[in-house]
Amino acid sequence: MTDHRYEVRTRTERFQGRIFSVVTDEVTMPGGGVAARDYVRHVGAVGVVALDERGRVALIRQYRHPVGRILWELPAGLVDVAGEDLAAAARRELAEEADLVAARLDTLVDLHTSPGFSDEAIRIFLARDLTEVPPGQRHDRRDEEAELAVCWLPVDEAVAMALAGEITNAAAVAGVLAAARARDAGWVPLRPLDAPR
């Protein structure tokens, strides 16, 4: 394979929203041509595989309007708080969506969720040594989040659900599969919180 730099010649913003924008880049191609590439620029996200002392994973059920149904997901959310690092965002989302605090957090896996049309990257963390957020300090969930349901499933059951097509959220599928593999390897594959992406 030859070393070719896909240089961005121009960028035109087509849409700007709170979470993402849509742009068209004019990019140099091998052989000297230039091609237009439309894609979504995303703020980024984090997700958390929260495992309790019994080897169960906390999964949530959440309505997702683009697919028009309720999905099995990990506690997860946007990296949209100024100055917040990825681990802090993961801790915030774990508390907000699952009412949990983790004494131990490790980097589990990194994903580009759909690199054919988006630059969205999500880091999945493994959370252990869990305690509950006290009832009076819990996040006030609104809109779709108001109906979040937290379910605890054995990791192997979650893996079977992913392989059976019952869990289809990309972060959840990758997270439960990576957690099962890391567990089976004695947690050796885990990376530090500040591991490069």
Image (cartoon, rainbow, N blue to C red):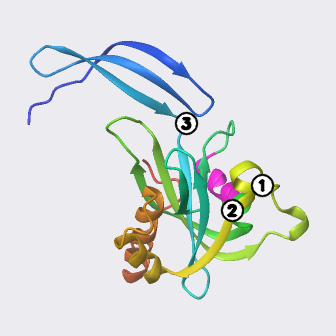
Q: Is residue 60 left or right of residue 171?
A: right
Is 67 above or below relative to 189?
above
The residues tagged by marks 2 and 3 sit, at their Cα atoms, a distance apart of 23 Å
Residue occupying image coordinates x 60% and y 45%: 78
Tell me which numbered mark, 2 or 3, is placed earlier along the sequence: 3
1 and 2 marks in contact (CB < 8 Å): yes
Residue occupying image coordinates x 42% and y 54%: 110
Image coords of residue 108 (percent x, y): 46, 64
What is the crowding at mark 3: few (fewer than 14 residues within 10 Å), some, or many (at least 20)? some
**Residue type for callout 1:** Arg
Q: Is residue 10 left or right of residue 108?
A: left
Image coords of residue 142 (percent x, y): 77, 50
Label 3 secondary element: loop
Label 1 secondary element: loop
Magenta span covers which residues?
A: 85-93
* Residue at mark 2: 148
Q: Is residue 87 left or right of residue 81?
A: left
Closer to the camera in the image, 100 or 82: 100
Please tell me how many numbered marks the rendered image carries: 3
**Residue type for callout 2:** Leu
* Residue at mark 3: 43
**Residue type for callout 3:** Val
The residues tagged by marks 1 and 3 sit, at their Cα atoms, a distance apart of 21 Å
Please, what is the dominant secondary structure of the magenta stretch? helix
Tell me the number on the disc at residue 41.
none
Residue occupying image coordinates x 22% and y 24%: 5
Image coords of residue 101 (percent x, y): 72, 68
Tell me the number on the disc at residue 141.
1
Label 2 secondary element: loop
